[in-house]
Amino acid sequence: MSATDALGPLARRVRRSLNGDHPGETGTMLPPLVDHHVHLQLATADDAVAGGIAAVVDLGADPGAIAGIARTEGLPHVRYAGAFLTAIGGYPSDRPWRPGGSVRELPSVDGDGDGGARADAERARERAHHALAGPVEAAVDEQRSFGASVIKVALNSVAGPVLDRPTLEAVVSAAHARGLPVAAHAEGERMAQLAIDAGVDVLVHAPFTERLDDALISRAAAAGQAWISTLAIHVRDDDAVAAIAIDNVRRFRAAGGRVLYGTDFGNGELAPGVNAVEVAALVRAGLAASDVIAALADPWPDATGAWTDAGIATFVPGAPPDAERLADPDAVAAWLATARILPAEELEPS
């Protein structure tokens, strides 16, 4: 098996056209690559594009502002969530970094406002089924009216109150009724479980504050939940937290879970473009190079990659690591970090 074959069905060996820059240069062609967790009001995307990222998913911004950014011609192509939906006084309503207009605080549909994650399951299901509170529907409809492709909720018990289960289930029901997935920031004890129990579609960070048990991970994978990796921020900040997140991803992937590449670009100092630290952490979490490429090229939140394409492709120059070195996190990371965006017409089968 050639090195290109070992990279999976998305990789093709190509040569650059004899016209233009670097004529005849050989390398690997991949689909356009996506960073599934960014904040474009907190970072400039130009460097990310120069580093091989063609499309991004913004997961928390003023809905009017991000809609305007997304309409800008050129790269990156943008999908977005709009505002964070959170509990009254919940994260990130008190954070100085939050862009103005980027948070919507929701009262409890249950009326008691306890902000707990321990609501009785039967009562929660009944409430979600029979009572979609007006403020929940209004918040979801607002994001949708600005063109959101996903609804983002914040479940951060470390930083303040969180949506109780009836309210979270109401958000999920309202979003799904409108054809929108729900993505959650889950941080703190049992927050990932709350998101899984309530039917949240995506965790915007691989769980990092606690080791999830195997049964819960299997349930998340079986339900079709996806996790956005964002491992590099933990490698940067805290080795112990990074180890928890990587272990959770390893077991989630082994259970058949869908992993999406994302960096939380805009959260402090992170290398733009294809982030070598993120890629290496994914390989350490048990993803083969072909799995990492699939995580980078996944079209979520859309069903197809039409939104990322527009006649472009990713070109990674030179030979890929050989089969033995494809198991080396640093080798895979160094190779993918050289990715560049080119017009697809400039690449020919080699």
Image: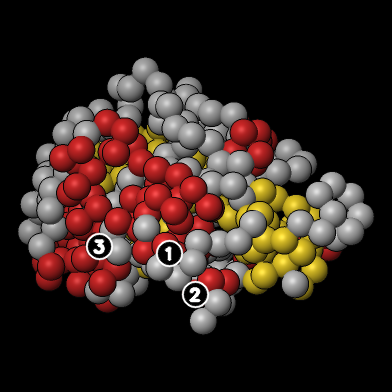
Left/right placement of residue 185 relative to residue 320 reads left
Residue, disc 3: 250
Q: Position of residue 253 (x, y in %)?
A: 29, 68
Picture residue at 49% right of the left edge, 48% below the top? 334
Badge number at residue 6: 2
Q: Is residue 122 left or right of residue 68?
A: left
Q: Image quadrant for the C terminus?
A: bottom right
Type of residue at label 2?
Ala
Q: x, y percentage for residue 116? A: 12, 44
Q: Outermost residue toward the right?
A: 19
Label 3 – label 1 distance at C-alpha: 17 Å
Q: Can you tell which of label 3 and label 1 is closer to the viewer?
A: 1
* Residue at x 33% of width, y 45% of height: 231
Q: Circle 1 sits on which residue?
A: 326
Bin the neighbour count of mark 1 within 10 Å (Cα to Cα): few under 14, some 14-19, many 20 and up.
Answer: many
Do labels 3 and 2 touch, CB within 8 Å? no
Q: Residue at x 47, y 43 (%)?
A: 275
- Residue 106 location in percent, x, y? 32, 39
Q: Is residue 102 visible?
A: no
Cα–Cα span, label 3 and label 2: 20 Å
- Helix, strand or loop at label 1? It is helix
Q: Report how many numbered discs are placed on residues in the image.
A: 3
Q: Amino acid at mark 1?
A: Leu
Q: Nearer the viewer, residue 268 or 282?
A: 282
Residue type at mark 3? Answer: Arg
Marks 3, 2: nearer the viewer: 2
Q: In the rendered image of this protein, does residue 132 appear above or below residue 338?
A: below
The residue at the far bottom in this view is: 1
Q: Is residue 29 above or below residue 93?
A: below
Applied colour scheme: secondary structure
Q: Are marks 1 and 2 in contact (CB under 8 Å)?
A: yes
| Label annotation for residue 211 | none
